[in-house]
Image: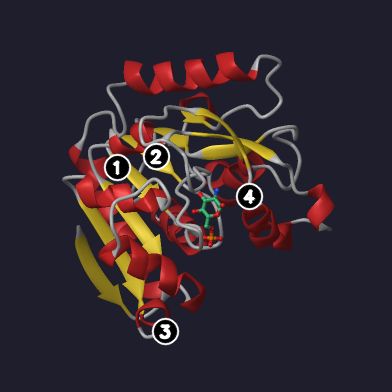
Amino acid sequence: MKLIEVKDNEEMSVEVCKLVKMKINTLATPVLGLATGSTPERLYELLVDEVQKESLSFKNVTTFNLDEYVGISGNDRNSYRYYMNSKFFDHIDIQIENTHVPNGLAKNISKECENYESRIEELKGIDLQILGIGRNGHIGFNEPGTPFSTQTHVVELEESTRKANSRFFQSLEEVPTRAITMGIDTIMKSKEIVLLVSGEKKAEALNALINGEVSEKFPASILQKHPHVTIFADEAVLKSP
Ligand code: GLP
């Protein structure tokens, strides 16, 4: 794993934006894995700017998001589909049918998971996966204890994850209890991974990721075994005790 230290989320976003741009410009049909949460928001704004300046095009790009809540529709403001459309896809020249976010309202959830995984395989996997990390070490929504062998599946969210994400909802009760997420194996099959770690609240997680043992108790630790991971960490996370 390569660690790149940056000043703040702004510098991180600028650097990762350059990486994404390079990847898109070097591949004929790039496949990107995308994350939600607060950390990549600025990255999406910068990518939108690039498209609006006409120095980048997503015409040939396909995307797969890491995860989605179960039980809420893509039109719900708290769904990850809504997040992606409103912050990113609606402002770029991507073909909307080439954007994939699991369907949290699918009648047959296990079939939805299987199809999601197959679609990624059909396109020969993810070229560049943008990843965030939860304070408990989750990647996507793979909570501690998730087997490393999992593919796209349904998870029960930990109380701490629901609390952390309740800031986007009216109340904790509204936060769904389940989600569909790419599995750890799905994420590990990405050809390249860029992990964004920003803010002092993530200091313990970053430390465990870099210095801890590889264990299912801390899902992100598996990244130590991936051949091409770059971690961008800002001063707030690096300087926090
Ligand atoms: C959610 C998402 C993760 C994301 C994490 C961190 O739980 N499912 O994919 O990495 O939040 O989000 P934030 O960047 O807001 O800290």
Q: What's the residue at 46%, 26% (across, down)? A: 98
Distance from Cα at disc 4 to Cα at disc 1: 27 Å
Q: Are marks 2 and 1 in contact (CB under 8 Å)?
A: yes
134 sits left or right of 189 in the view = right
Distance from Cα at disc 3 to Cα at disc 2: 29 Å
Distance from Cα at disc 4 to Cα at disc 3: 25 Å
Distance from Cα at disc 4 to Cα at disc 2: 23 Å
Report the front residue among 226 and 193: 226
Mark 4 and mark 3 lie on one chain; the one further toward the N terminus is 4
Report the front residue among 125 and 161: 161
* Label 1 sits on residue: 128
> Residue 158 has which mark?
4
Mark 3 and mark 2 lie on one chain; the one further toward the N terminus is 2
Of badges 1 and 3, nearer the viewer stands 3
What amino acid type is highlighted by mark number 1?
A: Leu
Report the front residue among 210 and 119: 210
How many residues crowd mark 4 within 10 Å: few (<14), some (14–19), many (20+)? some
What amino acid type is highlighted by mark number 4?
A: Glu
* Label 2 sits on residue: 33
Q: Are marks 4 and 1 in contact (CB under 8 Å)?
A: no
